[in-house]
Amino acid sequence: MGEMDTLKKEADGLKAQIEAGRKAVNDTTMATLASGVAAAPRVQLKNRKTLKGHLAKIYGLHWSADNRHMVSASQDGKLLIWDTYTGNKVYAVPLKSSWVMSCSMAPSGNLVASGGLDNMCTIANIKGASPKTLRELDAHEGYLSHSRFLNDSEILTASGDTTCCLWDLETGKQKVIYKSHVGDCMCLAVSPDQNTFISGACDSSAKLWDIRDGGCKQTFIGHTSDINAIAFYPSGTAVITGSDDCTLKMYDLRADQEVNGYQDAALNAGVTSVSLSSSGRLIFAGYDNFNCNIWDSLKAEKVGVLSGHDNRVSCIGVPDDGLGVCTGSWDSFLKIWN
Amino acid sequence: MSSKMQSSNNIAHARRTVQQLRIEASIERIKVSKASADLMHYCGEHAKYDPLLMGIPASENPFKDKKPCTIL
């Protein structure tokens, strides 16, 4: 037998071993256990604010750690930083490339990042007299789909080149490259303790990574199409994924498998974005069909809907204090609900 | 790329795949019942502090537009 055949046989054997290991601990379903839990209240959130200012599709939004400011990115070629309490625009950052796919704000509030089809992650300092480009992180060989700051000197990026990367902002160089996905990386989320992060990709899998050593610790399968959105459960022990297969899934990290699924036969729109309420009980999921559905994360039932956008909901976020949820859409508006 | 280089790339890729699968096969897993119970417990403990579950009084809602009051 050639080496390729031996390796293939070993890989198949290991996959079977993993499946058997997961099955061995699969002694019940969360749906069964949660049947005894009181239903979440029927959630009726009102649109409190509509932020108007972008002139084209919005592709990303990210709340500041101060729970009040927010950055949004649009293919009108701008990042806008908003004061969500007043609805006013505080800064506008012009982008060199208007083909932006994501944006993020550093926990300090000093820096914002953006990137997209230019394959770069551009870091701007927004705390001077006017926004100034600090760094252009240029090494990915595919589009930049997502980014998240760890602090003012480190940022994680996800790319269409199938890798994720940790960058040193002092030098502008790659510190760690995370290689294992075999499809475009579409999203990432950092664990509450900042030791690990999770990525979702077009290979239909989600992967858990050790931030510092670059190793892939776990791979979660089950989706049948691209994973567009991913979020950590606030406990840090589970992740929620949203996919083009029109479903969301909850994977528990310690059981190493899917423990709950969120789907509806009537829903045939892909999930574009996901965010959770502060206790983790409510999942806010944006879909291609212009709506945002609210799911009870334990009972896997739909408990509400946010409708009001005239086009795809492309991004969603809940601030750290949990006081509201913001949806961003291809209709060029951001809406805040609570 | 010569076919020899291509096949050695394929072998390198296959070796990495097997190495990765070995790591993933060796982890310790807890029972789904325990994992689910812990997640449900977390939710229960934090529900009372979750504004979107509990509702937000108008006076404490930073996003609610303050309407001016007219004294008649």
Image (cartoon, coloured by chain):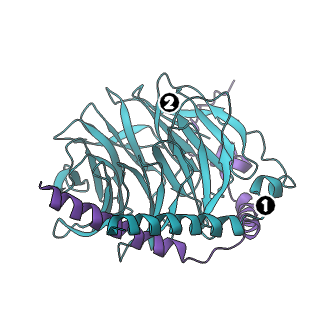
| B30 to A110, vertically: above or below | below
| A1 to A119, vertically: above or below | below
**Nearest the camera: A179 or A85?**
A179
Quadrant of the image for the N terminus of chain A?
A: bottom left
Residue displayed at 58% across by 31% down: B68
Looking at the image, residue A86 sits to the left or right of residue A167; the answer is: right
Colour given to chain B in the rendered image: purple
- The Cα–Cα distance between marks 2 and 1, rounded to whole angstroms, is 32 Å
Q: Where in the figure is residue A104, as x and y percent of width and height?
A: 35, 52
Q: Which chain is displayed in cyan in the rendered image?
A: A
Residue displayed at 53% across by 33% down: A287
Residue displayed at 77% across by 39% down: A42
- SS assignment at label 1: loop
Looking at the image, residue A268 sits to the left or right of residue B48; the answer is: left
First reached walking from the N terminus: tag 2 or tag 1: 1
Q: Where in the figure is residue A266, as x and y percent of width and height?
A: 67, 27
Q: Where in the figure is residue A193, as x and y percent of width and height?
A: 50, 72
- SS assignment at label 2: loop
Mark 2 chain: A
Write down the residue under mark 1: A28
Quadrant of the image for the C terminus of chain A?
A: top right
- Specify the quadrant of the image occupied by residue A189: bottom left
Q: Where in the figure is residue B44, as x and y percent of width and height?
A: 76, 62
**Nearest the camera: A219 or A151?**
A219
Q: Residue A288 — which label?
A: 2
